Amino acid sequence: MKNSFNVIVIVLSMIIAFGIYELYFGSAGNFTDQAKKKPQKGSTLGMIYTGGPIVGILMGLIIISITFVFERHFSIKKAKGKGDVSAYLKKLIESLSKGDYDTALKECESQRGSMANIMRAAIERFKTIENDPEYPTEKKMQEVQRAIDESTNLETPLLEKNLVILSTVASISTMFGLLGTTVGMIRAFAALGEAGTVDATALAVGISEALYNTAGGLAGAIISIVAFNFFTTRVDNYVYMIDEAILNVTQLFTIRVKK
């Protein structure tokens, strides 16, 4: 289901991009001829259209990048839960210090973030085995740690999901931009060679194809790289907070089982 969402986004982005490319940029009003080879004077859209189909691909990559920027923003925001994480953690530690597990679990239920889910798994497991004589002290903490590890393994991938798509778009945008630049320059010099003289129109079309593809590739790469680094930093900071919370909670549990 998750992979299906990504495929749908990618396919729709490409369809939308080529729709814009053909219907808007390639509108007949932007050109002086039916073959759409000569843009109207001063028509930027017509000049971009002469960049060729690779421009459409680059537009699609930019749309994909922007889509996953929003997807990551809302997903990470949801993973952080409701309210301030630091305030939640402070209330949680206070409740656990008093041995008030029910209040701590209610705090987790209200917060509903990845950290809260991990803390809830640890608290529920510790609450079950705290006074069980069949579990020695070390065994109790091993069980709590196992519950934490299982929950962490479920929550962490959700934070990092789709970051690889932004990284991939950043890489292939520059490659497609370079490909478009190369193709445009080939066409420019080919037109120059065939004419035997300087054909200003053919030369301009080839050079514009090269430059617009370069610009599109750089735009896609810049958006993706900045977004990737930004979200990676947010995820790393949040994971650090989770690790710190786990350490504090396990220390409290260790003190309680040794009493």
Image (cartoon, helix red, strand yellow):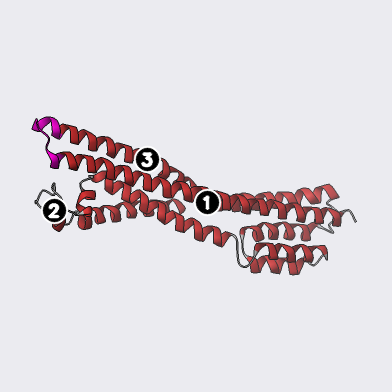
Using the rendered image of the protein, determine whether residue 136 is visible from the camera's viewpoint. no
Q: Nearer the viewer, mark 1 or mark 2?
A: 2
Residue in the picture at 77% in, 48% down: 142
Of pointers 2 and 3, the one earlier in the residue sequence: 2
Badge 1: few (under 14), some or many (20 or more) residues near its Cα, within 10 Å?
A: few
Task: Tell me the residue that label 3 is attached to.
Answer: 174
Q: 10 left or right of 201?
A: right
Badge 3: few (under 14), some or many (20 or more) residues near its Cα, within 10 Å?
A: many
Residue 31 - label: 2
Image location of residue 219, percent across then percent down: 37, 48
Residues shaded magenta: 191-202
Q: Amino acid at mark 3?
A: Thr
Of pointers 1 and 2, the one earlier in the residue sequence: 2
Task: Tell me the residue that label 1 is attached to.
Answer: 230
Q: Nearer the viewer, mark 2 or mark 3?
A: 2
Badge 2: few (under 14), some or many (20 or more) residues near its Cα, within 10 Å?
A: many
Of pointers 1 and 3, the one earlier in the residue sequence: 3
